[in-house]
Amino acid sequence: MSAQTIGSVAVRFPFFAIGLMCLALGVFTFLFFILRGPDGPVSGGIELPMAFVMVAFGSYVVWQRFMARRSGGGPDGG
């Protein structure tokens, strides 16, 4: 394998995996708060915005990956 092939595989896969993990953890946190509620105002004030950030980041990464494949581009969108 060339250095370019190793670099593209080694860099692109972790971002997609991290995006999926962030999306799953953010959705889990939202569902947890809906079903059980936060333990207190401080923990809810910290965890709820972080869940929003995780869902936003995960959605962005997954959206970019699927749109790059849909447009016929490679993993880097080109």
Image (tube, rainbow, N blue to C red):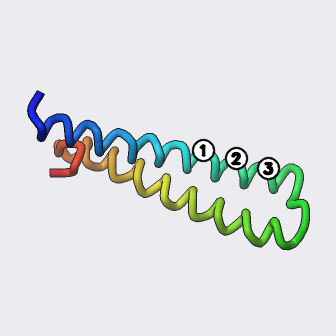
Q: Which amino acid does label 2 sit on?
A: Phe
- Location of mark 2 (residue): 28
Q: Quadrant of the N terminus?
A: top left
Mark 1 lies on a secondary structure that is: helix
Image quadrant where residue 52 sits:
bottom right
Whether label 2 touches label 1, CB < 8 Å = yes
Identify the residue shown where x is 90% and y is 60%: 39
Dot 3 or dot 1, earlier in sequence: 1
Q: Which amino acid does label 3 sit on?
A: Phe
Task: Give the x, y percent position of residue 49.
Answer: 67, 68
Identify the residue shown where x is 9% and y is 33%: 2
Label 2 packing within 10 angstroms: few (<14), some (14-19), many (20+) = some
Numbered circle sitting on residue 32: 3
Taking depth in this image into account, of 6 and 77 the one nearest to the observer is: 6
Q: Horizontal placement of 48 versus 58: left or right?
A: right
- Location of mark 1 (residue): 24
Residue sticking out furthest to the top: 1
Mark 3 lies on a secondary structure that is: helix
Compared with 18, 39 (above or below) is below
